[in-house]
Amino acid sequence: MDSLVQRSRLALWLDLIRWNRPAGWLLLLWPTLSALWIAANGFPGWHLLVVFVAGTILMRSAGCAANDVADREFDRHVKRTAARPVTSGAISPREALTLGAVLALAAFALVLTTNAAAIAWSVAALAVTLFYPFSKRFFAMPQAVLGVAFSFGIPMAFAAVRGGDARSFAAVLDAVPALAWALLLGNLFWVLAYDTEYAMVDRDDDLRIGIKTSAITLGRFDVLAVMTFYAAFIAIWAAIGTGIGSGWPYFAGLGAAALIAAWHFTLIRGRTREGCFCAFRLNHWLGFAVFAGVALDFALR
């Protein structure tokens, strides 16, 4: 009986951190790895690769736990989220926060194996991650806050690669060049695109309970805005690629991403829950296309 209870508890924990839905952490992983390759001018080494892959999974899982606790009163009124472990009462808020803290500490332990600059930027990343769930209460576009949170692996990647000699606050800042912030800006537009698609799924529920989302703020211009966000992401990363002398694989990856974005237009233009959720759920392939282009570009140099 005890083993059955333990397995049930484990199943609830895995459900809490969305273990069976890897699309979430893949959305964070691909731009982070792209930045890691660009910062290192190619393969960054197995140590940093393991740190950022495992760290991304752990922090996304911790973020899910914190988000579900913060949103538990809202989630019970949304069809898609009413059965989540915290919302349904299967897991207490304290238990969820404890699990989230353990996962976040495990991610921080990985960062401790890098350098002072990466450690410092990880603290900023955690602060943005914890702030995001509460931004829905008063920001008309909380997806912009999520965009920063989901893009913070980019400056951390540069810090981990280039910040080895950082011993002062100025050196920590210098470890993240303008190139990293340009990549983050471009990636922010991608997050705005796919998370607006996500928000379009729950728009009716969110309107009823009074939560703020980009889908509500944009109104009838939502589809146009999503496609504009995709275009801005691809244009900014294309400009960056030109600036750093990238070759044809880099731009081929962006071309594939543009085709995927065009396909998503056909999924979201009818504004159906199914179409918008499908577009969101499959967005990680767009990020993979970009990363594949980046990695191949450096491999062929």
Image: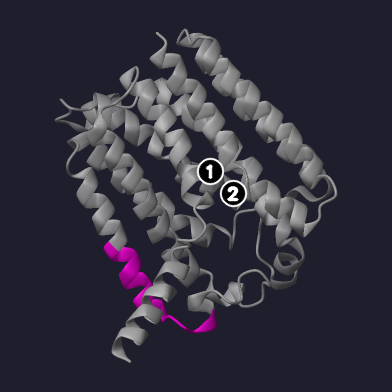
Name the residue rendered at 63%, 44% in the picture. 194
Task: Name the residue tied to disc 2.
Answer: 143
Q: Position of residue 295 (x, y in %)?
A: 43, 22
**Residue found at the very far bottom of the displayed protein:** 1
Total marks placed: 2
User: Residue at horizontal 49%, vertical 61%?
Assistant: 20
Contact check, label 2 and label 1, Cβ < 8 Å: yes
What kind of residue is marked 1? Gly
**Mark 1 closeness class: few <14, some 14–19, many ≥20 residues within 10 Å:** many
Residue 111 higher or lower than 21, as above or below: above
How far from the left and from the top, in percent, is residue 40?
Answer: 31, 21
Q: What element carries label 2?
A: helix
| Residue segment shown in magenta | 88-102
Quick one: quadrant of the C terminus? top left
Q: In this view, does 79 lie to the left or right of 25?
A: right
Which amino acid does the dot numbered 2 rest on?
A: Gln
Find the distance from the CA under tag 2 to the CA under tag 1: 6 Å
Q: Main secondary structure of the magenta part?
A: helix
Residue drawn 49% across the image and 76% down it:
85
Queried whether the magenta region covers residue 238, the answer comes back as: no
Q: Quadrant of the N terminus?
A: bottom left
Colour theme: one colour
- Indicate which disc residue 147 carries: 1
* Depth order, front residue of 202/257: 257
Residue 230 in sight in this render: yes
